[in-house]
Image: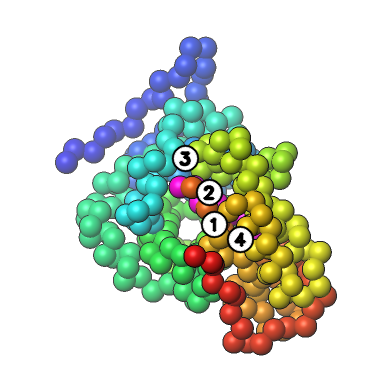
Amino acid sequence: MQRRQSEPFDPEPDTLVIVKIISTGSELTKVSRKLSIEDSRPVVVMTMGALHEGHCSLIRKAATIGRPVLVSIFVNPTQFAPHEDFNDYPRDLARDCKVAEDSGADLLFTPDSDEIYPEGLKNATTTAQRLKLPDVATRPGLEDAIRPNFFSGVCLVVSRLLELTKPRHCLFGEKDYQQLLVLKDMIKDRSDRFGIIEVEGAPTIRAESGLALSSRNMHLSEEQKDHALGLRRSLEAASTCSTIEEAQVRMRQILVEHELDIDYAAIRDAETLTPPTQSNRPLRALVAARLGSVRLIDNCEITLAQSPPRADEEVAPPEE
């Protein structure tokens, strides 16, 4: 199959786009060699497009590091299960190009599936399922339990993008907190393959209402956005509790009151995402719930005056 070539963005009238748009690894290599600084390894912000202020904050932070800023846009099929929203995931490349440029991007990498997975999607999916994943991708019982193939697909696509973009720094948002920890561990464990890469997390960006920004929010009606605020409110309620057990119960109560279908509501060790067993460890509150076909996640750092639970204690499963 002939791969598409990079094309200049066709801007709207009176809109000038200067950012370089690239769609192949070979072209990306050529452009990198022409950069006029000694170490041209970029700062990379990986996205699936549908850029919002959360992405923009990452790009702006990347621009302060003093290296070329490369933003990738690729909706990755290997991290979606057959019943999930790959086909419905919002896509607007023309808009994303302008948003990325306005936020400080120097290069925009927009590969197609053939560029990322030249072996074909079926073989790539098999490869993803065979990857050895960090413990934080398999042990917590959070995203790994609800979306069992998700981190395999994420680790595969990030590995391919790292090989193509060869970054010195990568920035990821804390909204996808378990994903951030997974990628930090994976990149550190494979430094012999990727080189030394600084991986940084950035705080979750929220709407004025408190709702964590997400590309999927555009699928929510105004009424549903009111219900979605239950995620943030459950985290706020947890922070007023004195024990982990009380906090987890209260989080679930708030989610149910907002008519959300709960995937999980848990307080975990902030570094391992396993149930806390020591009182002096940093904690993270994490929630995931659904509104119809839209799945939402949120999390925050939390401090409780509490005694550690038993090591074998489990978070109650969601009600049917």
Q: Residue at x 48, y 28 (%)?
A: 95
Residues under numbered marks 1 and 4 in contact, where contact means CB atoms less than 8 Å apart: no
Residues in magenta, as a range: 293-300
Residue located beneath label 3 in the image: 49
Residue 269 lies in the magenta-colored region: no
Q: Which mark is residue 261?
A: 1
Question: Split into 4 quadrants, where in the image is the N terminus?
Answer: top left
Element under disc 1? strand
Residues under numbered marks 2 and 1 in contact, where contact means CB atoms less than 8 Å apart: yes
Q: Please determine whether, in this image, residue 310 is positioned above or below residue 61.
A: below
Residue located beneath label 4 in the image: 287
Q: Earlier in the sequence, mark 1 or mark 4?
A: 1
Residue 75 at x, y = what percent? 39, 45
Q: Please determine whether, in this image, residue 24 is positioned above or below residue 290.
A: above
Q: Earlier in the sequence, mark 2 or mark 1?
A: 1
Q: Amino acid at mark 1?
A: Asp
